[in-house]
Image: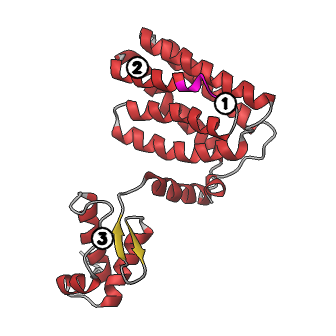
Amino acid sequence: MDVTTLREPKMADKVASVLRRMIIRGEIDEGTMLPPESELMERFGVSRPTLREAYRVLESESLIQVERGVRGGARVHRPRRQTLARYAGLILEYEGVTLKDIYDARITIETPMVIALATKRDPKVISELEAIVERESRLDAGADAVHQLTDFHAAIARLSGNKTLQMINEMLHHIIETGNQSLQPTVGDRAERAVRRSAKTHRMLLDHIKAGEAELAGELWSRHLRKAEEYLFTGVELSTPVALLG
């Protein structure tokens, strides 16, 4: 069997890997500063350029932020889902995926979620959705209304109980929220009607969940998402996620 010689990973990659693992596992608290460069150089047995290259890797992953100045250093950040959405947007742009494709994916993911919520009828879930729906009942049209209405979608994913689906849906939610704010009108009669219609549908869905009407909940939510998609894209040239994420 022919074996190709494997390149030894660069020392900077090894340093970044160790620090990354410590950050992900919570061994270094968010917001704290990493030890001084001189200390880390001695601990890892590397040069300053090597350590700073490792910093650049971690900074590109949004796990640290390098602050300049006398009291500067590398401050630790927890992994952020917005970073995942940004990189996913770049890949989707490269693949030529449209924003409509993202909305269609949300329908596929969210509909089973609401069916599951209606099946379980968890009092804590119902209570949290009640609070969101109550806030929505006082909304007027505007950019803030768009943001708060998408909070209901985020809550469905968060309350679903499946961490993997939650993360995927939140990634899509971040892209979709940006799309809503960029493409959806926020003033005028059409915007006001859309806000009232969405808030009313959210209340209806909550009623289905409370009653344990899983099939009706799924049908309502799928229909609502389709109508929201049609509303958003009427007369609009479809954009790609990366164009919206900047």
The answer to whether residue 245 is above or below residue 112 is below
Q: Nearer the viewer, residue 4 or 206?
A: 206
Q: Is label 2 or label 3 in front?
A: 3
Q: Nearer the viewer, residue 107 or 20?
A: 20
| Labelled disc at residue 64 | none
Query: Could you say where residue 230 lies in the image, as x and y percent from the top left?
Result: 72, 32
**Pointer 2 with pointer 3, Cβ within 8 A:** no
- The numbered mark, 1 or 3, whose residue comes first in the sequence reads 3
Looking at the image, residue 168 sits to the left or right of residue 73; the answer is: right
Q: Amino acid at mark 1?
A: Ala
| SS for dot 2 | helix
| SS for dot 1 | helix
Q: What residue is rendered at 60% in x and 19% in y?
A: 201
- Range shown magenta: 135-139
Asked if the magenta segment contains residue 38, the reply would be no
The answer to whether residue 89 is above or below residue 131 is below
Q: What residue is rendered at 67% in x and 33% in y?
A: 229
Looking at the image, residue 209 sits to the left or right of residue 16; the answer is: right
Indicate the quadrant where residue 16 lies. bottom left
> Does the rendering let one see residue 219?
no
**Pointer 1 with pointer 3, Cβ within 8 A:** no
The answer to whether residue 5 is above or below residue 210 is below
Q: What residue is rendered at 78% in x and 43% in y?
A: 236
- The numbered mark, 2 or 3, whose residue comes first in the sequence reads 3
Query: Could you say where residue 20 lies in the image, as x and y percent from the top left?
Result: 29, 66
Residue ID for mark 3: 33
Residue ID for mark 2: 126
Residue ID for mark 1: 228
Query: Could you say where residue 99 lies in the image, as x and y percent from the top left?
Result: 64, 46
> Does the rendering let one see residue 169?
yes
- The numbered mark, 2 or 1, whose residue comes first in the sequence reads 2
